[in-house]
Image (cartoon, grey):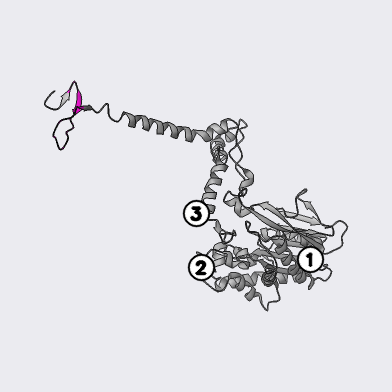
Amino acid sequence: MAADGTTNGRTEVLHYESESGTAKAPRHESESGGGGRYESLLVALMFVVVIALPLASNLTGHDGADPQAENRELAAMPRFDGSLNSLAAFPNGFSAWFEDHFGFRALLIRWYGESRLLVLHVSPSTTVVDGRDGWLFYGDDGGTQDYANETPLTRSEVDVWRTALVRARDWLASRGIAYVFTIAPDKHVIYPEKEPASIRRIGPTSRMDQVFTALAGTGVSAVDVRPALAAARARERIYFLTDTHWNDRGAFVAYQQIIDAVRRQVPAVPPPWTRADFQPAERTIEGLDLAGMIGLTRVLHETDLTLTPIRPRQAKVIEPRGAEATAEEGYLVTEIPGSTLPRAVIFRDSFTSRLVPYLSEHFSRAVYLWQNDFDADVVEREHPDVVIQEIVGRHLYEFIPSPELVPR
């Protein structure tokens, strides 16, 4: 052995026992750590297998997506038609498709959502708030800010709201058209005790309060449905647990208040239907829009409290053809065949969707437009007798009207 401790080009390491000082047999480094290399190779192989499984699943014809479990439209496979444009767009299109459809995607999302919501009691998404007793709330689009009364409208913003609505009322009145304005309360307004304790309210006054206060004394028919909904919730649940919106029974209460306000201006509009015109029913359903936002549509369930009409409804959807009355379409038209009832234009958002089957029974023709802003061109084209404008409360954090859209 050489003085540097080498033999035949290999390093030998001597080990000594500390007590006896007796040297142990030399051990070559090439003999140590062999098992470690095999373990590293095994781990690397397992890693490759795991990351290859989703692609392998797709190659065998399995789609990892579950379109019904998410509250959005998944990316479609891009089409290549031989053109340079389609060739250039294909890589990004395929990447978007693969992100939505890779093998086991729905299963992984479900596992993640279940572990977060059901085990840790934390929402898997910042857009959904995990409330108490199984209630979910929408935290995006101004939802949490509206619950917390985070920031009141400024004086100038309140003035803009008043100016826009008064101008719309005056412009319509000059044409003999009735006008009704309403704000649909988010469910945190009606069920504030179901919000988590971690979200604290900052101010006592909501933007909805500010707008209704600003309209007092202006002559604008502003319908505040909150008192009627508060009374109704004492009798039954009127909003969904896993959805942003009111259910059939909550929508019915709001509808009655709106039609009563319309009739004070246009008596030719028939009185609202009563609960005696419906048979209440219950059914178990899969989770709705909020459950879909966290990938748990098929995991969460709730009881849908419905109202089935005893007398037949007359209004039919004519545009888009084949659509349901509650369909969330940007442009939806209903008509009652042969009717001479007044006509209506309704500016709306998603909260009107469940109002449509009720409201449409009162108008020979009702045009529903998914927009917050007033549209004078549509009114002049449709020649309605009534204009209803609905906006959900949380949108007061996202939307300020434009008075200039209403002609002088």
Closer to the eye: label 3 or 2: 3
Q: Are marks 3 and 2 in contact (CB under 8 Å)?
A: no
Q: Dividing the image into 4 quarters, which one contains the C terminus?
A: bottom right
Q: Which residue is mark 3?
A: 120
Image-quadrant location for residue 376: bottom right
Disc 2 designates what residue? 200
Which residue is rendered at x = 15% and y = 27% of the image? 5
Q: Amino acid at mark 2?
A: Arg
Please tell me which of labels 2 and 1 falls first in the chain: 2
* Spatial CA span between label 3 and label 2: 21 Å
Residue 323 in the image: state x and y as whole percent.
Answer: 75, 50
Q: Magenta stretch: give its range.
A: 7-26
Q: Is residue 349 visible?
A: no
Q: Residue furthest bottom?
A: 217
CA distance separating discs 1 and 3? 41 Å
Front residue (pair 138, 376): 138
Characterize the magenta stretch by its predominant secondary structure.
loop
The quadrant holding residue 187 is bottom right
Q: In percent of the image, x 69 and y 53: which residue is there?
A: 284
